[in-house]
Structures are given as C-alpha cells and as structure tokens.
Amino acid sequence: MAGDPFFQPVSGMDLPRFAGVPTFMRLPLVDFDHPRFADVQIALVGAPWDGGTTNRPGPRHGPRQLRDLSTMIRAKNGSTWVAPFELVNCADVGDVAPNPADLMDSLARMEAFYTRLKVAGVRPLTGGGDHLCTLPILRALAKDRPLGLIQFDSHTDLNDIYFGTGKYTHGTPFRRAMEEGLIDPKRYVLIGIRGSAYGREDWDYAEANGIRIIGIDEFHRRGVEDVMTEARAIVGDGETYVTYDIDFVDPTFAPGTGTPEVGGPNSWQALQVARALRGLNIVGADLVEVSPPFDQTGGTAWLGISLMFEMLCVMAERMAR
Ligand code: MN
Ligand code: MN
C-alpha cells in the first residue's frame, strides 16, 4: 500500500493520551460515508445496546467506556510483537445505532449494519453491548454458510425461553443462532462455563447437538495451552467467529459485568486464551458484557479493551499473510 498508508492511531508521543476525542485505540473515525471507507479492512464497532439483559443492565454504556480506556493502548503488542496497524487497515467505524425502545427493531438495525460491513469485505471487531448483540452479527456474517464459533463465557447462553415468551435475551443468542443454521455445531466450542444453574437443559442441548463445552474445572485442570490446542482443532482452518464475554474472567479481575461467576481465569489467562487464537481464520470477533455502572475503577473496561487488542492482533496477522 505504498503511497496509501494504513490509518494510524494518534501516538501518545504526539498528543497526550488524556487529550483528544476518544475513538477506539485512537484510530481515525471512518464511517460508511467517509471517502476512505472502502480502504477499511478491520472495523472497530461499538454496539451500545443491552436490551437482552435479564438482570443487571449497563453494557449499553460499554462502547463509550471501552473507547475512553482504549486511549491507553499502544501500537505494538509487547508479548507477540505483532503491530496490527502496520499489517492491515483498521479504523473505528462508529456505533451501530440500536432502538432502545424496540428489541426486534434493534436486532434488525444491527443485522443491517453488519451486513453493510460484510458486503464491503470488512471484518468487524465489536465492543458491546450485551451478549444478544452477537446474534444479529452472526445473522449478517453467517447468512450464506454456518461459521465455526469459539465462545469464552461463564454461561452457555444456549437457553431456550425466558419467562415463558422471551426468545431474545442475552441468555439465548446461541440457541437462536443454532436454530437459524448460523453455527456449525461440530465447529463450536464453549470455554469457561461455570456457576450455579437453573438446570442441565443447556448442557444436554449442547451434547445432543455435538457442541463441545469445556467447563471451568476441566479448564483449570488442563490449563490454557492444552485447552486451546483442542479449541483450535475443533474450529480448524475454516471461517470462525470469536465471541468473548468478559464474565469469562474471574470477577476479581472483571467485576464490572452484569452476571459475574467466581472461580474463573485470571487476567493473564484471559489474555493467553486470546493470544492462542493466533493463525485462525477469524472473520469477526466481539467483546461483550462490560457494564460501566458496575465497573467502579474502569478496570473491567481496561481488561476488555486489552482483550480486543489481542484479538485485533491475531486477526491482522492472519489477514496480512
Ligand atoms: Mn456470561
Ligand atoms: Mn454470554
């Protein structure tokens, strides 16, 4: 791309990190109407919506807080030395606009937004938002064929119905995605599942459909490297989506979320599982359920955006091959 350089983040050496308008990782804001939108390869997207939340709300405020904390992200990965902004063209494309008064309209608006990205050949990396946001993303990205899916979470989100009629909640997105043929169950792995349960129905559903669940006891017993070797084998080299619920991480490290579960991975392990995605064919990824009202120190958002940076690095490295 000589003569047409990639978008670069504003360096903390040129403008202090506490100054300026906070876009994702200090990248330029390049929305659909921007003259250089066609150059974008990885889009950082905000999904400020939590209409699927059944208990403690707040992730609608996630994207703004993630953008604020993202001003502390520097341009190179200090562990892998991947420099994503030198490999592919990354930009903040803004927020998908939900309808806070209409759940079904919000799902439709989000699907339309991500369909525009897919048609343009852009791979989205989303900061949520609650976990229901992933359903319209999958509807857009997996319209023509099912995708592999790696889900980091303390919950399966494979439940069927809430309160007798609730088909669309942040506890049901992957049940709906399965029913709609958006996920290849043989290439679907959930990692970190734990906590008290309503029942075994979601685990039974997974088992009956050939979905692999690696619960937290198995995760801790085997360790990150072994577990991620299996996860990588499950999705293989085919097109894969990665969805990362911040409640995968132990609430000591990520208390700012609506449905925390104790006994989880620490922040280093949280980074390691993301780095272990290296080389996979990732067509999109998200980090969801950061809830600023429960994030008194901003530490959960900081971990969240750090995880988004790790996923950005692995996506960029593979795309630059
Ligand atoms: Mn969860
Ligand atoms: Mn979830």
Image: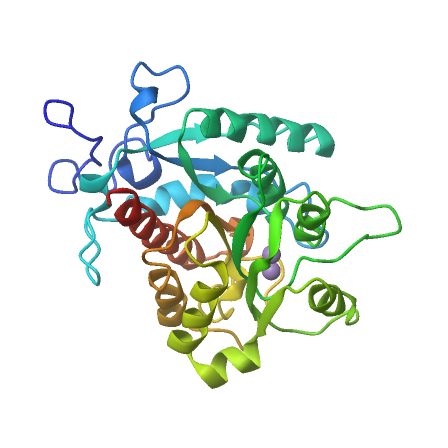
Does residue 229 appear left or right of residue 14 in this picture?
right
Rendering quarter of residue 276: bottom left
Q: Which residue lies furthest to the bottom in this view?
A: 221
Image point 71% across, 54% down: which residue?
Answer: 55
Look at the picture and state if 271 lies above or below 298: below
Rendering quarter of residue 105: top right
Q: Where is residue 175 in the image (x, y as percent from the top left)?
A: 71, 52
Image point 66% across, 54% down: which residue?
Answer: 56
Residue closest to the eye, 289 or 64: 289
Does residue 132 appear left or right of residue 1 in this picture?
right
Image point 65% across, 73% down: which residue?
Answer: 195
Residue closest to the eye, 287 or 38: 38
Residue closest to the eye, 156 or 138: 138
Q: Which residue lies furthest to the right in this view?
A: 164
Q: Can residue 309 be seen in this view?
A: yes
Look at the picture and state if 222 lies above or below 48: below
Query: Which quarter shows the C terminus?
Result: top left
Does residue 174 appear left or right of residue 44 in this picture?
right
Counting labels gives 0
Instruction: Report the coloring of the rendering.
Output: rainbow
Residue closest to the eye, 192 or 27: 192
Q: Can residue 72 be seen in this view?
A: no
Q: Position of residue 19 (x, y in %)?
A: 24, 36
Which quadrant of the picture is home to ligand 1? bottom right
Q: Position of residue 267 (x, y in %)?
A: 39, 68
Query: Which quarter shows the N terminus?
Result: top left
Q: Where is residue 124 in the image (x, y as percent from the top left)?
A: 43, 38
Does residue 109 appear left or right of residue 121 in this picture?
right
